[in-house]
Structure formats: structure tokens, C-alpha cells
Image (tube, grey):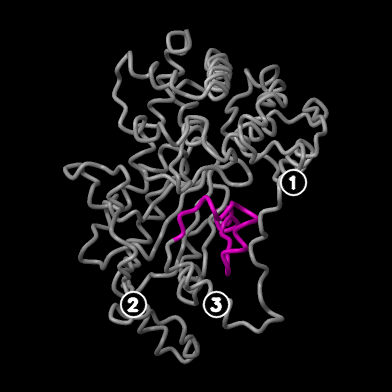
Amino acid sequence: VMSSSDLLVDLSEDPATAQLGPLKLSTYEEQQWPADEPPFDAASPHLPWDHPFYDIARHQIIEVAGDDNFGRKVIVFNACRMPPQHQLDHHKLLMYLKGTLDQYVESDYTLIYFHHGLTSENKPSLGWLRDAYREFDRKYKKNIKALYIVHPTMFIRTLLILFKPLISFKFGRKINYVNYLSELEDVVKCEQLIIPARVREYDNKLRASLKPSSQPPMSPPRSPPLPDQVFGSSLLDSYCKDTFYFIFVYVAGLEMEGIFRRSANVTLVKEVQKRYNSGEMVNFYDMEDVHLAAVILKTFLRELPEPLLTYHLYNDIVNFTCNSDSKSTLVESLPEENYASLRYLITFLAQVSANSEINKMTNSNLAVVFGPNLLWGRDNAMSLSAIGPINNFTRILLDQQQLVFT
């Protein structure tokens, strides 16, 4: 198997590809590994030092960033956070990535790969990339709806050409190149991604190098809230507006297999949001799409300016242990409108899981879907080590909802 370095040499010496100068990766010395990008943020919860994946997790190469505009979970891979090859066990990195995806492969999900920062010193071998693709069997590829490669170089484009015989046509259609961060706004709100400073700086340099007439559009500024704003407004303002918008799901979705796992047409999602924010009534019966109503519910929760479980409880829930008294105490400490909304939601989801033999949505499955939509950190994204405790807390609320909400 040809190594990565062999690939670079062969391409540079081949007259047919002699013009591919940009393919050459910068050296380690040319790259500045800035001090503002530490291996991990000590203020955030991370795996304990003796955990088998501690040495991988601490670099924050892989992140989870809630749902995209289509209602799909977003997994982010940051190439610039990969340390030099001799400091990273690439096999463990692959196992860590698989472990992350295992939590979401039963649902539709999106993978965003930030390519900037991959250098000749930290890039994995071609053999590893080949094995990684083969390692991800059908269960991982089936529900990945899109792979976005941000800031692609000639190297990554050529690499995909070389791998074309291995990549299925169906998977190949899911690969998308994103040249500027602003283009991601069509997929996911960039503010919910923890985009490394180096990547943002590189994006700004790319923009600055273009002629004014060629400048890509900047991310649109936030518009002031509408008088009847529902999505993105505070829970108190929107609590009485149709409460949670899922009566249709309650009627028709209890027996829909995979409810809350599937995505929806993004045009319809935006249309429904616009109608709600304009104060219009929305009749999901007319749309005849139970998954649309499910995505609207998750979108409403995710776009709250503060999560339903509040920032105040973030550390308590992430460090939560299965104590029968503490969970009730935590929930009861919520503001009144948060408590009422959470009780309403959990009671409804318990009805969904009561039909799990038909819809396949057990309490554990629902917790994986809703946990990241009920709580996230102040920076919007979430360290992987926090996901397990948050999902576990959500599952306990579902398992013991009658005790918790007495």
C-alpha cells in the first residue's frame, strides 16, 4: 500500500500532475500550533485521566453540535486539533469516532470535517484512511445524510479521486465541498459549532484574498425578533403559544417507527418556523408528515436562548449520579415555566416509549435524541464526555417520570 509521503512524491514527479503545487502540505515548522488552542479546556468536564480514551478525548478532535437545519445530529471532526503523528494513536482515534457515531447511527446524522490544519506532520497514512472507510460498515453509512468537507485543498480532492474505486456511488453523492464558513449556514447555524480560531482566521484570509466582486456572502446578521416570535425566543414568551406543537405527533406518531430519528424537508421546516413566528396557525394534518412535526419540536427546543434544563444545572447534571433524591431536587429547582414544560415533554415522551414495540423508540433511544436538545454548555457545542451523563439523566427522567414529577 502506498504511503501518504509516497503519494505526494508520485504526484509531484508525474508530468501529468506537475501543476498540482497546492497539493503539498505545509511542514510542522511552517504551522503555528497556537497557545489559544490548548489540548483541552480544564473548565469543561472530560474523561478521567485513567479512561482508555482520555488521551484521544482531551484533544477535542471530535465534537457533537446538536441538530442541523434538517433535524439531524451534527458530528464535527477538527483536523487542526490532531497532534503530530507520534503523539496520537490513530487506531484509538478511529475507535473513539466509532464510539461517538454508535450513539447516533440509528438516526439521521451529518458529519462536518474541518480540513484546515492537516499537515505533513499530523496527517494519518493512506492505509489508515482506507481501513477507516472499510471499518465503517453499512450501519454507519446508511443514515449519514451528508459529509461536508470545509476548506478543501487540492490534496483532499485528489485523495478522494484516488479512493473513488473504494467509495460507493451512493456514499459519494453525500460528499459536499464547502469553501467558506458562511456556506455552512444553509446546513447548520455556525454559532452552535465550536469552530477553532485557526479555522476562522484561515476563512478570513481566504475572503480577504478575493476580489470584492468575488466575495462570498457573509453569514446573515440576526434579525430583531418578530412580535409573535416563537423560535429562538425565551421559553417564557413562547410557552403559551401552542405549548410544544406536536399534537399531530401525539395522534399519529406513537406508532411511527423511528419517530424523532428521521430528518425532514428543510424548506418545509423553515416555512413552518416562519408561519409560527408570524403568528399564523399551523395545521400539520394538511402537511401529512409526522417527521416534520417531530423535527419542529426538536428545533424549537434547540433554538431556545437557554436550554430547557438551564445552564445553571449543567455541571450538576453532567456530574449526576443515580441518587433517587437528587434528580427530583434538580428538576424542582428549575424555573416554574421550565419545570412545567419539561414535565409536559417527558410525560408525552413516556407515551411514545410505551409504544416502543411498534415505534422502536425506547427510553434509551429517546434519551439519545432529546438529551442534547434539553441541555448544552454555554458555548453551544458539547464535549463528548458530557453527552453520556446528559443522555443518562434524560433516560432516568423517562424511566421514573411518575416519581420525578409527583
Reading the image, the residue beneath label 2 is: 31
Give the mark toward the camera: 3 or 1.
3
Q: Residue at x 51, y 35 (%)?
A: 307
Reading the image, the residue beneath label 3 is: 206
Q: Give the range drawn in magenta.
A: 169-195
Q: In the displayed structure, does residue 360 sit left or right of residue 248?
A: left
Density class for disc 3 (Cα within 10 Å; few <14, some 14-19, many ≥20) is some
Reading the image, the residue beneath label 1 is: 267
Residue 31, given in percent of the width and then of the height, sits at 33, 77
Residue 98, given in percent of the width and then of the height, sits at 37, 45
Q: Distance between the residues labelled 2 and 1?
A: 41 Å
Residue 392, given in percent of the width and then of the height, sits at 38, 27
Nearer to the camera, 265 or 317: 317
Nearer to the camera, 371 or 309: 309
Q: Earlier along the polypeptide chain: callout 2 or callout 1?
A: 2
- Tell me, for residue 355, which label it has, or none: none
